[in-house]
Amino acid sequence: MDESISAGWEGGVLVRKKRRYLKMLVFSGKELYKRKEVLNLLKAFKERKISRIEPKISLEGALSYVDAEKIMDARGEVVRNILEELAEDGFLIRELLETRIACPQCGSLNVSLRLRCSACGSTSIKRGESIQHNKCGYIDFKTVFTVTDGLMICPKCNESIKKERGDYVEKGVLYKCLVCGEFSQNPIKEFICSRCEKNYREEDYNPFEVYGYSVNEERKEIIEIETLDLGSVVKNLRSAFWEVKTSVFLSGKSGLEHPFTMVAYRPGTDRASEETRIIVDIFFEDKSINEIPVISFFSKILDVEVKHAILLAVPSANDKAKELAKSYGISVFECGKMDEVADTLWNAIRPIVEEEASKTFMEIAGILETSQVIKNLIKEETEGSGQQLDSKPVEI
Ligand SMILES: [Zn+2]
Ligand SMILES: [Zn+2]
Ligand SMILES: [Zn+2]
């Protein structure tokens, strides 16, 4: 009990110490989760159509979350912004996958490298396996020394050279400038943007961080909460002329505000709304819920006016929870699956609605009956006075 009472509400979810959650169903009410694109994404997570959101870089050099775009039925920046908002809200965890080179002029990620001679700046550069003739010091590509298979001649001093004699040393891969002849291991690297053709040096590029997203395990319940549709229950209640609010905060006598999954009442006088008020909390756990949600619910309903307190447990409530709820006057209903919550809830509420309707009928019938009695009285009185008039003529 202390654990839940000392905890705070955060985005509709009661956060307990040790970072555990009491999973109560209160929609966050945030505009973000009402967006069609976000609901599409949440449903895809729920149905396991997607587990991670990975980016792809197009040929045009733009980053996009292709799978998420298809699911969300939106493109580009809209999707990227939503993913960022979901990460900010703590629902998604963003993970740095890599840092890419982005064009400092247009931002494109489609880039190619160009080599430039470090001595004269020419881009006329060739790459090849190079050797150096020991005797004269001449360096060139191995192919330049090779005349025919097995026979090698130095183009500078015209001497025949042989590997077995150790006439030359392998210099590995070198770059040769065809303009000034400079051999270099590290020519200047220059980036060229494939979109806007700007060229820029290594030190001038914009580092572009590429992120992937995954669901924060600790906020996973947002999927269940925000995708749950209580619309049918709301509709049924409204057609029976009840007022209903979902994910509502009620001010208690203590001055504290308490969140509830749903509150319904018959409109009319305050007296009527208090006397008919139904308060519902839906709690869900992986296994059955224990007594903690019952205590939490009880502490809230003690503070507000309520006639019917309903606790819906997904998938079930353990015996201790049920026993405790009974002693608190809370009706517990169990629902095996999240998908069946709306039906179970309506089955729980319907008898109350029907009872109230029949009460109203009786009341109206009562009023009609009373009015009939009054009518009869008036009639009798009128008739009586008529008789009186007849029997007692006015005497002057
Ligand atoms: Zn560019
Ligand atoms: Zn030579
Ligand atoms: Zn050069």
Image (spheres, helix red, strand yellow):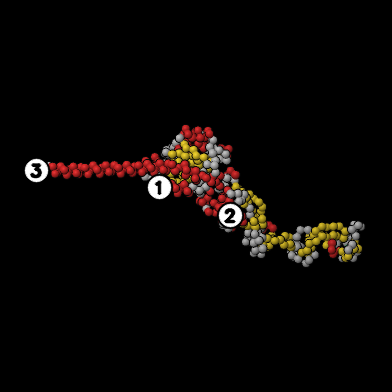
Q: Are marks 3 and 1 in contact (CB under 8 Å)?
A: no
Q: How many numbered badges does the structure rendering display?
A: 3
Q: Provide residue 213's location: percent of width, then percent of height.
A: 61, 50
Give the camera-side residue of 209 and 395. 395
Residue positioned 80% across, 61% down in the render:
128
Question: Looking at the image, which residue sits at the far left?
Answer: 396
Q: Which of marks 2 and 1 is nearer the N terminus?
A: 2
Q: In which quarter of the image is residue 122?
A: bottom right
Which structural element holds mark 1? loop
Give the camera-side residue of 252 and 307. 307
Distance from the alpha carbon under mark 3 to that under mark 2:
97 Å
Compared across the picture, whether 6 is left or right of 253 comes to right
Residue positioned 32% across, 41% down in the render:
366
Kindly identify which residue carries mark 2. 71
Amino acid residing under circle 3: Glu
Kindly identify which residue carries mark 3. 395
Amino acid residing under circle 2: Ile
Distance from the alpha carbon under mark 2 to that under mark 1:
38 Å
Residue 146 visible in rendering = yes
Circle nearer the viewer, 3 or 2: 3
Kindly identify which residue carries mark 1. 241
Distance from the alpha carbon under mark 3 to that under mark 1:
60 Å
